[in-house]
Image (cartoon, coloured by chain):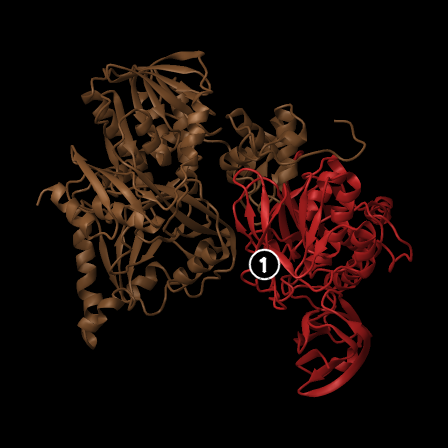
Amino acid sequence: MKDVVVIGGGPSGLAAASSIAEKGYKVVILERDDELGGLLQQCIHDGFGTILFDESLSGPEFADRFIEKVMRSDVPIELETYVKSVDKKDDHFELLTVTPEGVHKIKSRSIVYAIGCREKNRFEIKIGGTRPAGVYTAGTVQRLVNLYGVLPGKNPVIVGGGDVGLIVARHLYLEGVDSLFMVYPEDFFSGLPRNAQQCILDFDIPYRNRTTVKRILGDKKVEGVELVEVDEEWEMIPGTEEIYECDSLILSVGLIPYSEKIEDLGAEIDEETKGPVVNEYYGTTVDGVFSVGNLVQIFDYVDDAVKTAYIVAEGVDKFLKGIDVKRKKPIKLVPGDKIDTVTPQRIFYEEGEEVTVFFRPGVEKENAVVCLVNLGNVIKTYRKRYLRPSTLEEIKVPKDLFNGKKEVTIRVR
Amino acid sequence: MRIPQKVKKITDESKYNISFVVEEDIVFLKGKVETYEDWVDIGLKIGGIKGVNGVVNDIVWDERKDKASEDRKKRSKRSKKENLGEYDIVIIGGGIIGCSIARELSKYELDVALAEKEPDVSLGQTRANNGMVHPGIAPSKDTLKRRLNVRGNAMYGELSQELDVPFKRVGSLILITPRTMEKYRKYLPGPLYRFFLKHVLPWFVKRRGEMNGLEGIEILKGEEVFQEESGIVDDVISAVKIPSTGIVDPYEWTIAMYENAKKNDVDFYLNTEVLAFDKERGLIKRVFTDRGVLKCGHVINAAGLYSDVIAEMAGTKEFTIHPRKGVELLFNKRLEDRVHHCLAELKIPSHPTSKGGGINPTVHGNIIWGPTAEEVESKSETSVDKEEIHEIMQKYSTILPQFPESEFIRYFAGVRAASFTEDFIIRPAKKVKNLLHVAAIQSPGLASAPAIAEYSVELLKDMGVDLRRDESFDGERKSMDRVSEMSEDELKRRIEEDPSWGNIVCTCEMVSEAEIVEAIERDAESFDAIKRRTRAGMGECQESYCLLRIAEVISRELDMPLNQVKKEWKESQFFDGIVRGEEP
């Protein structure tokens, strides 16, 4: 019997596994790919680790820090492992895994899901038109270019001005496409300003804001796209359609937590984050099932995602020790005015000093005041110099603030 | 009134100048109209005349450019002289109909060839079928459709055993709601409307089914409907349950027919487009293709959307296909428990040319909504727009109000090969005595397919084909092994023999590398061909995880560079180019 199974060998899973192992628990890591590191392995650009390590690392370098740590510990690593099923028994879980070595049953007292997120595809954002070869998600293109040395096409169009889109654009530009065009629905690139500058503006890569792809053209292979202008609500403006010839379309239109499996186990899912509802130690609504990293919500920085892994180690420890200072009814933390998402969504334990709360603003605002509100009364405020929807914010909330309350709303004033 | 007079009445009423000729109950139309809608409309009106056996609609609409036929003329010059072989029967078209006929013919001592222009079978309208094996209640009593549908449906159970393809007789519910006869509500005041919908209309529907030869039809009222299907809209008044309705995977079925026919010595020529015929004394002697020449005794026209082109090519123009697009929404498997029967809301008056689609479970556990029905100008028009997605979401969420209609994972469209007479056209060609048309097979073509194959062989017998049973015929076909369906012990055993059974390349649908390799051994050469055989890429993430992993297996197994791996056709290579500095 294991104490903890960590599903997912990306940075969050690795960090969670080594932190939990340091506390003396029997941990195993399961990873579906044939190497550890998760998505970082295909991110060969730098910029990782500025928060955690105060240096700018490439994806693989950042991953290596965590891989090495796990390697030095005695945590077993099962690669090429597919988790076929997870059954909840009275006091443990039973996992059935499939690997090229065989079929295995693993018993464990708890599970940490660190299975990350996936990219939204063309169907999820309802791009119309045909279904030819040549439409890819940005992650697929990163993998294709960086791991296989193959280009998706000679004249791609990229949709989405977030960080992933910006970085893929620069890669394709440097790796030798003939032409490149980026469109995105916002007023300005939603990725980090430094990425917009270094990936697009510095290379004079053509782009157009307030624009999206309405339809894909071409029966067998992408022959072009129908571009359309959008308004502030991202609604298409009729009459502004325009055909643009290209041979491939790359989508960088958002990430979505891989929450199906955890939902099947009975965990409650947050409509806004699309990930599981978690408490301050990243426990889900199913006892003994935890969730970290991008599965909880989409983080802008892997550094922040990894923070959840350190916190989960405390939660797993409490769970395995049977420490029962839980509140009878967890306090709800809910997004209010001008806030899109909040995690954690529940405050579960009475003891502890403070809670790290992440929230995503719903508006762009300078000199904003972020308020915690209970029954109409502001109980604490935080000043933020600049808020915008594409930047996840973090605040530390003293734990005693929650005492005697049922629900605390976080909003922007 | 005889046919010419009836046709004249319609052309006289038209605002256009339309001339016509009637020959052997086939109406040939000429003239000019302004819009495509008018072109369809007049064709349908004339096709609707009782006794008309075909409408050849040569009316020109607007400045209609017949680009396809020009292209074909150009291509016909490319036909190859090389002799491919001599056959008793040459089938044109590798959809469900062509493949079902091929298998049926392989039971006899005949040399049979099948020519398909696409690189795989089931790539025409078969591919986009929603998989519903209709019971046969919809077609009118005197149609060929009705007879073949009821018979075909009954054949599915046994055939699915032989071919090892999942088939489920889930039954269908025809739902009667306050919206069913909205248009006639004014004639049934007060409680009368509801009374009619609860006690009279279901009886009529049941009676119609019985007249069509269906058995076991039940009428459900109020609570009884929710017992069968709990998610249905609260205000449903009654329902008619038809137990014989089934579901099947249309391309898996077609691939199974193909594999079994091939095993019984039918020669399949894929990537082979028929370009011309060589006739002697009114009989086709040789079929010219872009791959070579097929000598033939008899020819079967099962060319689906292009069956009118084949007929014209053979010099026996006797019907026109007007393409009708259908869009479908496919939902996440996780919603499997929400729908157990094929569901449709009865609407009177019904759509004149389509039963109007519905909500269906699939054998794989997805739920499918649709199809729509829209007349389109092009036979290859399978694009889907946002408006069409919303139309489906709106239309069917009235039946299942709690269903999360935004959780679809894919949308797609297919084109039906409709004729203006709106019935199947299965008969010897009028002017070519060794050509059998098996054409205009639209809905319920899937349900009818086994019976169409059987009937086609009967007709061939009448046309003089000598049918002697082939004693060596083996009708059993074994499906692919699937990791997702294996017991733990079986999977353990497989992995011991070959570790690639334990390498899961598609995590949404749980498909192993070994299955990809087996699909390639079963003639799949492209990503989509593998997808149809293994279901890899059909899950929630829609290929984003498995695409490169599978492309890598294809590249290795077929010994081609990664950037030459195809999605489907030779023109649909996935990737293009290599990064700067890398050697090709």
**Chain rendered brown:** B
Instruction: Residue A88: tell me if it is visible.
Output: no
- Find residue B532 and report its horizontal and vertical position in percent: 49, 36
Q: Farthest residue toward the front?
A: B17
Q: Position of residue B89 (x, y in %)?
A: 31, 18
Residue B528 position within the rendered picture, expressed as x and y whole percent measured from the top left: 53, 36
Question: Neighbour class for label 1 at 10 Å: few (<14), some, many (≥20)?
Answer: some
Q: Which chain is red?
A: A
Camera-side residue of A314 and B225: B225
Residue at x 76%, y 40% (from the top left corner): A146
Q: Give the amino acid at mark 1.
A: Glu
In the image, residue A334 above or below residue A138: below
Asked which quadrant contains residue B219, the reply is bottom left
Q: Determine the chain carrying the residue at label 1.
A: A
Q: Quadrant of the C terminus of chain A?
A: bottom right
Q: Is residue B558 left or right of residue B160?
A: right
Q: Nearer the viewer, residue B169 or B418?
A: B418
Give the image location of residue B420, x and y in percent: 26, 43
A96 left or right, relative to A8:
left
For numbered disc 1, what is the local secondary structure? helix
Q: Write the residue at 71% across / 54% down.
A: A207
Residue found 33% across the figure and 56% down from its top: B344
Q: Which image quadrant for residue B85?
A: top left
Q: Residue at x 20, y 17 (%)?
A: B464
Looking at the image, residue B171 sits to the left or right of residue B328; the answer is left
Q: Which residue is mark 1?
A: A263
Q: Is residue B221 visible in this depiction of the protein? A: yes
